[in-house]
Image (cartoon, grey):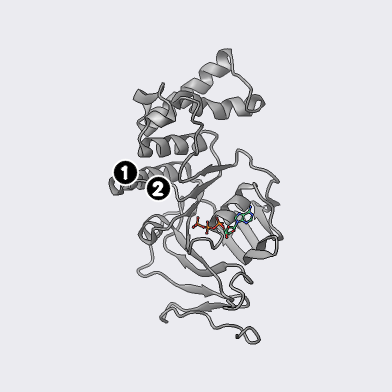
Amino acid sequence: MSFVEVRRLGVTYGEFPILERVSMDVAEGAMVTIVGASGCGKSTFLRILLGQERPTAGAVLIEGAPIAAEPDPDRGIVFQKCSVFPHLTVMENLTLPFEIETGGPFARLFGARRRAAREKAGAMMQRLGLTHAAGRWPAQLSGGMQQRLALGQALLRRPKILLLDEPFGALDPGTRREMQELLTELWRETGMTVFMVTHDIKEAFELGTRVLVFDKIRHDPQHPHAYGATITYDIPLKTPVPVEAPAPAAPHLTLVTDTNVKDVSHERPTRPPVPEGRRP
Ligand SMILES: Nc1ncnc2c1ncn2[C@@H]1O[C@H](COP(=O)(O)OP(=O)(O)OP(=O)(O)O)[C@@H](O)[C@H]1O
């Protein structure tokens, strides 16, 4: 049994299929990076993993059980922007997860529980280098600091799965590099399973233990929205933590099609053929 199993997942909005027949098995501790053209359904896939949306077809299992019908502390998420609450200070953003745990978004912590929450938030601030900014509002932070705060907030409840939707897309190259290093450190420390959407191919290959490419296998030029995207390439790169093993010398490419899985490590990747009966 894999940690995350996705079985012939499909998502349709109205009459438009966005994702179709997406299947994968993901080991615990993997860092799965996801690339694909804009609009092919990468964020939709993350929302399904979060439990924010239900799939139209297929299933997602986590540790063998169907995914919870709504977000829970086992899954944290960080978006490109606006992941933290603008009306709360850094400290308040980091104690909020514990307040929600106690009794929903309007709950307040008092006494020993408040002290414990502030201690954990303080330790996280130190880990993220934000201690000096405890009393600042998010609008008073740089983009990199805001994303560090968002990562910290997502990690405080120790999620088993961290979902990242282009988390470093709005950062300058230097800050982006720092954030990539921080993410790698936190991932190694926690052993959590990460799904990260990125438009930066280099980032996908540098950070991921496995790269997934989302694209449409079937395409009808007369009806460009007739088919959804699926996984067209599934490229394992390194063994995920905690198992320590040397990375393979060269990436082993697997071209995933609807009906078969074909080893193409010795071939140049080419566009999959249009199935019979679908030719314009
Ligand atoms: N709630 C919704 N209702 C209807 N259509 C939606 C909804 N959410 C997303 N879509 C559509 O689904 C498609 C996929 O969107 P999604 O944001 O998942 O793509 P993406 O691959 O993450 O794109 P990008 O890389 O640009 O962020 C888009 O055409 C979008 O307009």
Q: Which residue is mark 1?
A: 175
Residue wearing tag 2 = 168
Label 2 Cα crowd, 10 Å radius (few <14 / some 14-19 / many 20+): many
Comparing 66 with 107, the one in front is 107
Quick one: which residue is furthest to the left in this view? 174
Image check: 230 left or right of 211? right
Q: Amino acid at mark 2?
A: Phe
Q: Residue 183 in the image: x percent, y percent?
A: 40, 45
Q: Is residue 248 visible?
A: yes
Task: Tell me the kind of residue under disc 1.
Answer: Thr
Tell me the quarter of the image containing the C terminus: bottom right
Q: Secondary structure at mark 2?
A: loop
Instruction: Name the residue located 64 percent from the left edge and 42 percent from the top edge.
Output: 71
In the foreground, 224 or 71 = 224
In the image: residue 179, left or right of residue 263: left
Q: Quadrant of residue 3?
A: bottom right
User: Which residue is at 46% across, 42% downward?
Assistant: 81
* Sequence-first tag of 1 and 2: 2
**Residue 213 spot, x, y in % from top left:** 49, 66
Q: Nearer the viewer, residue 16 or 247?
A: 16
Q: Residues within 10 Å of mark 1 (few under 14, many from 20)?
A: some
Tell me which corner region of the image, top left, top right, bottom left or bottom right, holds residue 200.
bottom left
Which residue is drawn at the image coordinates 59% and 63% (left, top)? 24
Label 2 beta carbon less than 8 Å to ligand 1: no
The answer to whether mark 1 and mark 2 are in CB contact below 8 A is yes
Q: Position of residue 64 (x, y in %)?
A: 68, 53
Of residues 257 and 133, which is closer to you in this image? Answer: 133
Look at 56% across and 60% down and name the residue there.
41
Residue at the extreme front of the image, as rendered:
222
